[in-house]
Image (cartoon, rainbow, N blue to C red):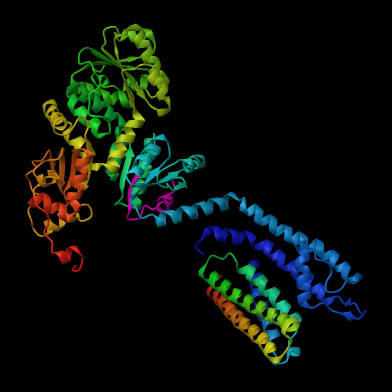
Amino acid sequence: MGNNSLFLIIKRMRTPMFVLVITFAVSILGMVLIPGVDDQGKPYHLSFFDAFYFVSYMATTIGFGESPYAFNYPQKLWVGFCIYLTVIGWFYAIGSIVSLVQDKVLAAQIALANFQRKIRKMEEPFIIFVGYNTMTRRIIDRLAHDGIRSVVIEKDEEKVKVLSLEDYVVEVPALVGDVKDPNVFKVAGIHKPNCRAVVSLFNDDAMNLHVALSAKLMNKHVMVVVEATHDEYGQNLSTIGADVVENPFKIVAKRVYLSLTSPSLLMIEQWLYGDPLVLRKKDRLPREGKYIVCGYGRMGTALEVGLKRAGIDYIFIEASPEKAAKARSGEKVIVGDADDKKILLKADIQEASCIIAATKDDLLNLSIIMAAKRINPDIYTIARENHMSDAVVFKAAKIDRVIMIESLMINKTYNVLARPLADRFIRLITYRGEAWGERVVKLLKEHINNNPDTMETVIDEKHAYALSLRLKEGEEIPYNVLYRRRDDWRLENRMLILYIRRGEEEMVLPDPSIPIRLGDEILIAGTKEAFEDVGYILENIYELHYVMQGREHELSLAKKLGFEA
Amino acid sequence: MNLEKVISGFFIILALTMNFGFFYGDPTVLDEHSRYELFGAIIVNLIATIYKLGDKTQLGAVLLATSLVADIQLIGAASIWALGEYVTGMNTEVVVAIISFSGGALLANIVSVILFTGDVLKSKR
């Protein structure tokens, strides 16, 4: 018996069933043995059937009366005894069933069985999320729109209940379980071939390390995406083979660096993360003057690298002396509360051009910004927002730039899972310089429009049927075929191939005249209409024929009518 | 000595012996077969079934299956008896059906006892 819930029911019902059989047996036997008197005054014995029939309705308190004839006193004495015996037995059995239905262990077993059935039936690619919170909720929602399903492992039963009330496009199976037990990964389907990744975005790095380790040990082929905000954990994670280690503070530092040195690259990066392709006022940081960074923790140390590389003068304020003591010699760190006016004055806030409130306490960050603005109203303010629930107060505080750690993580994780080529492209362009960035932005804006969409695809039989047929025959087809329009092959669609990955080889902004190879992965920017055309050209042999030859595919009448295959 | 084993062994073997006691005799003559013995066989078989419930092992599953077969056969025999007595009337065909049903149950019980003893012999404690 593989089913635990059924086993549990049977085990709990053993004693009640035993009691029931014994009480019935004793009552029936008594009824058969005691002689009665029939309507003619002759002695008789109840048959086993009569006795069984009578006891059945007596025990269940249905009570149809005395049958087949009215009982005499010895029989009545026995029946009186049997009533108490069987009714107690019967009620005991019913009570056991009722308490079993309310039993938490049984409910958990039934929920587990349901979950396992859902995982077994899941045919689409899916991703296992460890921990359910505002971040994973948003990622799951976005992935669901892309047709990628999710499975959640969550320790807290209340959160799983909240999840079940959520209105996702597709069902999200959730399992109540602790990741400290590696078995939960097995139950969640880590061994299934369509399990794409395990994602763990806990605030606690040790927890993420634990998840990554168990997941990799259970199935070394599965992709593991984890958050790590401390360098030592990040290194450990890379050693055990975690595929993607995300550090939100490094992204922040990189963005600060990019906005100081090459705003166009920042623009492209933010665009690929889902923002519009524009540079807003908040993205332009002051390049002159001193920066005051409040908090020398994980974000502070990351910012230190970015600011130093950008050649900006900066000073830190840190409340904890231990953290301040970790600073390398030569770094300027003032120990004290950053929302204290005296400390801010000590850091020359009147002269500073920018203040970054980068502590892990949202309220403290707000109060730092308020204090700084009171002394120096012209200062450029940057605040770190740790929790999305605080968004309203941060908006009201009129801060120049709010860095939302959680939404950064959401976008980054979504890119890694659903748009891996865009994620790779961002990493490749980081150090290309402002001139290159400007050229790309100009290309995108002139060639396509002010806010292009992106598309990722693979040249294989599944995603590009028509094209792969021709490529297999050894035909040489250049990439510019994809640019051609379906209504007139001499015209070009508004699109741009940004990146091609061909095995180990990577091409950023490739020359469109290079030939297409099977297995190429391509990232395209363009309009929705252009993507529709590309889709047809890749998949449909007639459309492909037209854009290549400039005329319709010739077919015999018989073939058109379907007489010949 | 395991008390659990004593009790379950007792019921499994008693189920077989009572079943045999009812089955033994001329299959066409109902007077040679006691109705009390059939009743006892049914009850003991039911109890034996309950004892076999909830054993997750392979052997437990097969033991339970044999017991369920015996239950169905014996209850079938009792039902035919009731049917013959109150509906169709007793004739040789009905009597033979009752006895042969209990014979089927007897076979199932024999298999059950063989499996049980086999398990006991295999165990080293």
Residue A411, quarter of picture: top left
Residue A406, quarter of picture: top left
Q: Is residue A525 above or below residue B85?
A: above
Residue A236 visible (yes or no): no
Query: Which is nearer the eye, B8 or A47?
Result: A47
Q: Is residue A404 above or below residue A457?
A: above
Horizontal relation, residue A497 to residue A49: left or right: left
Query: Where does the C terminus of chain A fall, quadrant-wise?
Result: bottom left
Query: Which is nearer the eye, A537 or A408?
Result: A537
The mark tally for this picture is 0
Query: Which is nearer the eye, B2 or A305?
Result: A305
Instruction: Examine the structure image and report whether residue A269 is included in the region drawn in magenta.
Output: no
- Looking at the rendering, the stretch of residues picked out in magenta corresponds to A180-198
Instruction: Name the residue furthest right.
Output: A41
Image coordinates of residue A188 in percent, x first then y, are 41, 51
At a point 27% along the width and 30% down the height, the residue shown is A275
Residue A158 visible (yes or no): yes
Horizontal relation, residue A246 to residue A170: left or right: left
Q: Is residue A5 above or below residue A160?
A: below
At a point 87% along the width and 77% down the height, the residue shown is A35
Horizontal relation, residue A237 to residue A16: left or right: left
Horizontal relation, residue A140 to residue A67: left or right: left
Image coordinates of residue A169 in percent, x first then y, are 40, 44
Residue A412, quarter of picture: top left
Query: Which is nearer the eye, A491 or A189?
Result: A491
Image coordinates of residue A475 in percent, x first then y, are 8, 56
Instruction: Examine the structure image and report whether residue A184 is included in the region drawn in magenta.
Output: yes
Image coordinates of residue A199 in percent, x first then y, are 35, 43
